[in-house]
Image (cartoon, rainbow, N blue to C red):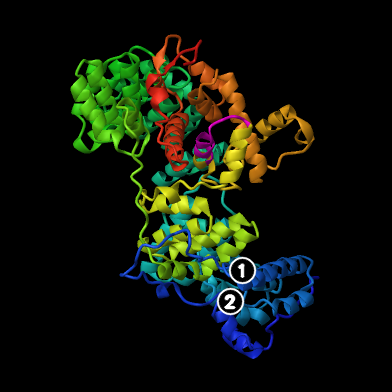
Amino acid sequence: MRNKIKHPFEKVTHLRTRLAVLGLTGLLLGAAFAFSPSDISVNDSATVESYDTLGIRPDASMPQAERLKSQREQFVAIEQMLSRREFTQAREAMLNITDYPLFPYLEATLLENNLSLQNEALILEFLREHRGTPAERQLRTSWLQFLARRNDAQRFTRDYRPQASAQLQCQHLRYRYQQVRQDSAELERFWQEVTAQWLHGRSLPSACDSVFANWAAAGHRTEQVVWRRIGLALNERQTSLARYLTRYMPEDKQDLALLKRRIHANPSLVRRTQEFRDQDYREKEIILAALQRYRWQNHRATISAWESVQEKFTTFPFSAAEKQQMNAAIAVTLALRQEPDAIDWFAKIDLNQADPTTQQWYLATLLKQQRYDLIHHFVVNLPTDQARRPQWVYWHARALVELGFNDLGHAKLQQVANERNYYGFLASARLSLVPELNHEESNYSAADLQAIANHPAALRAYEWRQLERYLDARREWNTLRTDLNAEQQLLAAVVASEWGWHDQAIFGFAQNGELNDVHRRFPLAYRDLLNSEAERFAIEPSWVFAIARRESSFQPDAVSPAGARGLMQVMPGTAEHLARRSPGPARNTAPRLDAPEDNVRLGTQYLSELLQRTDQNWLLATAAYNAGINRVNEWLPNEPMPADLWVELIPFQETRDYVKAVLAYQQIYTMLLGKDANVLTPVVRMQINGKGRG
């Protein structure tokens, strides 16, 4: 049986009283609990300050730096004591660092290990004092789990706040049902919450069963709701759940649910039009979903099936929107397959109303077939706001030049040449102009920045970063951002930049639409490291900066869904391959992909290898860094093709966008590193082909 421990402030119940007894009130309230979010205000008379001399780090002064360094060491030591359940030693040591920003985490951990009704007042006091913080959420979840085990409905519902745990969500619904069952108006709102809980693609905890039973008995498990959940289950590949749910469909509709399951498992069955009776509008839903998947397996059979079902369905005919969606999907598939009749399918749809992917592949088809006349016709008929987008201005200009209207084409290029993006830089290269960065320094005052930097959540985030606990730091930074208005969030991005927290600065500026502070959005992060590794492998430093900026926004612990890691998002398998090829001790040492030094060394080594494998074509090497060299080789045309056209024809949207971004970022970093050269000049002259590569 676990021994109960005493709280370090066992003789008092109110936090400030406890601190007063200890003689520490001023210290803690002056740091970690200095003010509430509403105390932050932006000075209307803010002046532009030099962002590199503000000194707003919490440890900017030497005495404070030494003090925080000592507190960090004590914090880690106390964490270890708590993990070893040395609670007496831990609570005594905690008294020495009550003003440390991360102290609430220690208190939360201590309380988590002493959950009892005897300590209820202490727990509730902590939850009130730290409401909305990660430490509060951590303790609240443990407290609710404790109350659920005791089946304490009154305390559970009183202290419940939205939880990620489905188990706790269901427990909350069970207890709430007992409270609202006699109130018809409240009960109706409650049933809507239960419906939302039930609509889940996976099985739910047994704690939900009794609520769901009452909900179903009240008539809320309707045919439409069951149908929706079957779809959710199939999308989650929970075929057993979908089969189980079918029993809740009306008897005369269970065959329809079975058909949905069968065709979801094997989309090619959509060709068997005799399976469909045109007796229920949901048959169209089944057909459209199957055709969307089957088109990648057999696009010709998909076209045949689509034409057949359109003829068959007269009772529930396909709507104009459904036809637009399916015709566009087929057109895109044919364009990706480089089929000549793709253009005929694009003619079946309203391209002005098409989504960006469809419009992109219409452009690619016209470029592939060199139909510059149709490009001109398409762009001039776009709505004005769309026609002004850099991509369409650039390709309209290119089309005009190809059609012999050089002056008009150059005038169009001039319209976009001053923009800071891929197409703007391409246009400036074609006109032999120096690219424009359009940098605008952010406006702020030092006092406003200091107010943000002194926010308790910001102080906690800063300390987690110093401890290299980046996930915890981001949680606290997100807590901070939720407390700020739009103007203050921009200030927070500047603070992050001042602290060298580049990824949060980059995300902050982007999320607030403040895109012109180029120096902060494109920091020269890890400059010495990136420069030295670029020099070692004889590649352009601006290219390395651009890759790192696109891959991770300079987040050293970044991990992609595919498993790529670190600043340059190196895959573990690639790291092992490169390590075996490395001379010296590195060959026998497992690389640390979260360590910037190892990651950048491997990333630049890989870029160098890709350059060699693409005949020194850095455009193809850039694409290969994202998609792999084998795929890039598959995409090489048999006949020479202009490089800007080849980029538009890259089949993978991710890689296509990646190449455009890296080239634009490389132009920006080239200029930030002190050169005015137009990086894209070689691109406008380059021809891509399967032999010479460019």
Q: Residues within 10 Å of mark 2 (few under 14, many from 20)?
A: many
Q: Residue at x 48, y 52 (%)?
A: 198
Which residue in the structure is indicated by mark 2? 126
Given the image, on which type of amino acid does mark 2 rest? Phe
Residue 667 is situated, as x and y percent measured from the top left of the image, at 42, 35
Decide whether residue 683 is among the magenta residues: no
Residue at 63% of width from left, 67% of height from top? 142
Which residues lie in the magenta part?
A: 537-548
User: Residue 97: which quarter of the image?
Assistant: bottom right
Q: How many marks?
A: 2
In the figure, 445 relative to 617: above or below? below
Is 546 inside the magenta-drawn segment?
A: yes
Q: Is residue 571 left or right of residue 488?
A: right
Most extreme residue toward the bottom, as rendered? 21
| Residue placed under numbered mark 1 in the picture | 139
Where residue 442 sits in the image (x, y, percent)? 37, 56
Is residue 214 or residue 447 the one in the foreground? 447
